[in-house]
Image (cartoon, grey):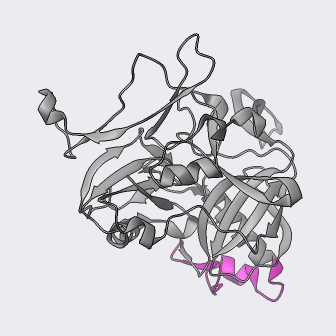
Amino acid sequence: MQWFWIEPLDTLSFRGNRLFGDPGSFGESMMPPWPSVFAGAFRAAILQWDSSFDLDAWKRGEIAHPIVGSWQGGEFKPGSLQLGPVFIGRKTQGDAVETLHFPPQDVLITQPKGEPAPTITYLKPHDLGQTGLQGRFVTTQRPVARLSRRAKPQSGWLIHRSGFEQYLQGKPINLDQLIKQSELWQTHLRTGIGMDPERRSVDEGKLFTVQHVAFREKVGFVVGVEGANLPDSGLLRLGGDGHGARFERLPTFAPPALSDAQLEGASCVRLITQAPALLSGGWRPDVADGLICAALQRAEVISGWNLKAWKPKTARRAVSAGSVYWFAGMPAHRVRAQWQRALIRADEGFGQFILAIA
């Protein structure tokens, strides 16, 4: 896996992951963006860099690009380029890069009224059969958070890499390992008007709003890429308005992750989605051996724009990023394999995940 630092040169506008932040807050709905934003940016750049390639013949579906892919019967067939994980990142002292992570669905951050600091609570699988509660549950257990008193979940927090690594090991996150979103970026709305292309004038009654994200200095994305020999640095067109972004290779970067050896002794493994997941089985893999519990938000709708046909891509319901699945009695490699077999549009980065100790 090659790793790159991508830093926007201006505000960004794109349809991002609505559910990794607060689903009720439009101000957080753009972050992080869909991974297809970066896959499309790199594919477009590769076609531009390859000056000897016949772009017009490619558009007509007459030839294929080995890295980008080809058009066959009006459908796009991806090439060797595979997008890996996408993280929010921040450059620290000496330009070292730290990843920052949205709280997964089993991490509940609350701040009771009158309390000076937030409280972190964790959802755990629980067998509700012993409580007398009945329902049509698909899994044998349900995620439950034990709170000492009622409190509303708080949004707008991210977790430093050190805290996320503790979380992966099944250890609690410290309060000083949280960071406010407002320290990393700001969001604002811009209003636009519809235009009549024939009269070249305002199309009355058509107003729309676009959300823009403005990053703080030295805040950007860490993106993994496979299947392409990319330059060490360059420029990309990123986001819905094609705003500029600078990228550079991170030769020594390693993502937060546990090895199979660390996961080997765990009786229960958690799978945390790092991007929206399109799965063959709907909200879970069609083969989900060992699945005992899941913490999900409502589904997200994934679409996109087909530039060749000049129409939207087929909309599909996806599992939201940050969803958590518990697998018991299953080795990590089998959990990983059955998830990967169920992925759709994986080349664009959808369905990226990380495994953790439960």
Residue 21 sits in quarter: top right
Residue 122 sits in quarter: top left
Note whether residue 351 is visible.
no
- Left of 172 or right of it: where is 295? left
Residue 231 at x, y = what percent?
Answer: 81, 79
Q: Is residue 63 magenta?
A: yes
Q: Nearer the viewer, residue 67 or 104?
A: 104
Residue 200 at x, y = what percent?
Answer: 83, 39
Residue 294 at x, y = what percent?
Answer: 33, 46
For the N terminus, the image quarter is bottom right
* Residue plotted at (53% across, 57% down): 313
Residue 315 at x, y = what percent?
Answer: 47, 51
User: Which range of residues does the magenta coloring cover?
Assistant: 49-76
* Residue plotted at (63% across, 32% down): 156
Note whether residue 183 is visible.
yes
Q: Nearer the viewer, residue 121 or 207?
A: 121
- Left of 106 or right of it: where is 135? left
* Residue plotted at (77% across, 46% down): 12
Q: Is residue 169 above or below residue 191?
A: below
